[in-house]
Amino acid sequence: MKIYRYEENPLIVPAQVPAYHEGFEVIGAFNAGIAKYGEEILMLLRVAERPVSEDPRVVKAPVYLPETGKLDLIEFNTDDERYDFSDPRVIRNKAQSGSFEYLTSLSYIRIARSRDGRRFTIDDAPFIYPSGPLETFGIEDPRVTQIGDTYYIYFSAVSPVGIGEALVSTTDFVTTRHHGMIFGPDNKDVLIFPEKIGGKYYALHRPTTKSTGNPEIWIAESDNLVYWGNHKHLLGLRPGRWDSGRIGGGAVPIRTEKGWLELYHGATPDHRYCMGAVLLDLNDPSKVIARSGHPIMEPEAPYEQNGFFGDVVFSCGALVEGDTIKMYYGVADTSMACAELSLREVLDSLEYV
Amino acid sequence: MKIYRYEENPLIVPAQVPAYHEGFEVIGAFNAGIAKYGEEILMLLRVAERPVSEDPRVVKAPVYLPETGKLDLIEFNTDDERYDFSDPRVIRNKAQSGSFEYLTSLSYIRIARSRDGRRFTIDDAPFIYPSGPLETFGIEDPRVTQIGDTYYIYFSAVSPVGIGEALVSTTDFVTTRHHGMIFGPDNKDVLIFPEKIGGKYYALHRPTTKSTGNPEIWIAESDNLVYWGNHKHLLGLRPGRWDSGRIGGGAVPIRTEKGWLELYHGATPDHRYCMGAVLLDLNDPSKVIARSGHPIMEPEAPYEQNGFFGDVVFSCGALVEGDTIKMYYGVADTSMACAELSLREVLDSLEYV
């Protein structure tokens, strides 16, 4: 697989992004949803801001307060034995079974704009900011599906009651309409198909289950993009391979002659995130036709291997021009990059099931 | 709170129910959804059947095979240190984080019929049986919402990929129409309101989250009962109280002058299940008005305290006649019982929030 990583990579790094919150630092500008709007390519960046701590023994957890619209800061001492600070992204309560009790940063969505897809300028203010009690720990990893003139933007909504997926729509990237949480917790990595198939909308989604099962890809259908049902399990983990630990949809599904091509991420149990692809039936996307035996992209460049959380390539959006896939992707939970792949080569690389 | 437990309790015990599968024993006939159909009161029993094991050191896990419609039996030796057999309901793989890898019984739905609500006769065959890959470990804890002439029956669908909620409808309790999984995993304890409110259908549901959060009650809306969205967190646990470990909807919400009355179950972390109530706004059921400070019913009778999984009262359906709530409920994950409560007394007992 030939991969052309842009010479400008990483295209956006946190140091370029002024913090929106006083007393905070931007530690991530990554996992952006991608849209073409007019003459511009828009990155809907996930910007993660962390409260600056003068004392390395003090960790501050930011929490959005829906009543006031302000942030509260909760302080933890790293000596506190009730908590586990080993994952820099989260604060875990050892007495509880969840994977976190607080996050160490708060994410929101901010737009970066470009004419050439390589040099971006970043808006001064957030575009979509947490709102309401289901987003008090932030909003993360947006994707954008354009249907007609409307852009549907959906993202993980994180709060103490779990992680679900919320939907917002816009026609101008200025005003937004909120449609509430479309997939209840725990769910993330939703990808809405860009057109109706057999009269129905479809979306990939990624529940995380506690009873049994693994973080795997499901598919659901809808008639209005807001209410979803007929959930089916679509794609599972593969023990021993690159996608043995967790998988989730990446870019918006791409319509090809051979089927719907989904660029998805897969991680090993030790959290090395690669990108691969799966091909779904054009007329019934709940049918898997083919799948990557090996990743189409692995974290190999220094900016992919080193960062806030290293060894991660994680695409939330791509553009297709002829045979070229311009895959934008977050690197190391820190920055944004872009690589070009041949659509034909990706399709040819798949193993038919 | 005055509670009138029927003299006939338990109304149905497993010994009354002939096993449907050869070589199996019925270990539970419990957690029944309730419907009035013509002159009859129907219990839609959850019947749990377990493969008979001649050797106490051998545990057999039944698995439905969608391809053939038959059951496969997977044998485990209780000496096998990779597995935890301490919970009689499940087989847990110690190397995995989930709460089970297999179940020790397989549940399906079978109808019991009565004219007086006390003496029931049990159908010979299942009414709703597992179908498809999302139900290979069985279907559990049905509820029934009547809207017009249609009865909507929904239940937990259990399989290796998680527990979700599936929907079936019927007008005659003979033929059924399957609508697929309406709430993806992990989710159970769905309760569909019996009428539209402000032009929308509503349902309570109970996600189980892995990231953070607790097993608590959410609410969603729909325009067709099959696709659901606008998920909101409704009701949380209360540390130190009877509903501190997990909660979930019980009976179909009851319309009263004061609001929608939901009889819900709450358990402590050590799995003692009681019934309580919550009152929701008539015009906006996402608003909580009042809630039981103490249980309206606790496991006190011997048949409630002792059984396959003791100390459990768990209602999946009730009938209301005037001021009388006839609350049918599963006891000790084993049998069915019924108790009458005064609607007014339940309402008067609630603490307004």
Image (cartoon, coloured by chain):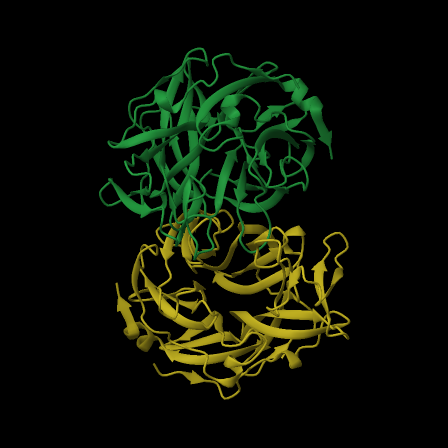
Chain colours: A green, B yellow
The image quadrant of residue B97 is bottom right
Question: Looking at the image, is B289 positioned above or below residue B307?
Answer: above
Question: Looking at the image, is A230 positioned above or below residue B116?
Answer: above
Quadrant position of the N terminus of chain A in the picture: top right
Query: x%, y% of residue B197?
Result: 36, 54
Residue B116 in view here: no
Query: x%, y% of residue B278?
Result: 35, 65
The number of numbered discs placed on residues in the rendered structure image is 0
**A108 left or right of B162?**
left
Task: Kindly give the residue lying farthest to the bottom in the view shown.
Answer: B7
Query: x%, y% of residue B208?
Result: 48, 55
Query: x%, y% of residue B229?
Result: 44, 46
Quadrant position of the C terminus of chain A in the picture: top right
Task: Kindly give the residue lying farthest to the left in the view shown.
Answer: A68
Residue at point 49%, 76% (across, down):
B311
**A21 left or right of A113?**
left
The image quadrant of residue B308 is bottom right
Question: Looking at the image, is A78 positioned above or below residue B76?
Answer: above
**A93 left or right of A338?**
left
Residue A168 in view here: yes
Residue at point 51%, 12% (across, down):
A7
Foreground: A111 or B314? A111
Foreground: B338 or A121? A121
Residue at point 73%, 55% (across, down):
B65
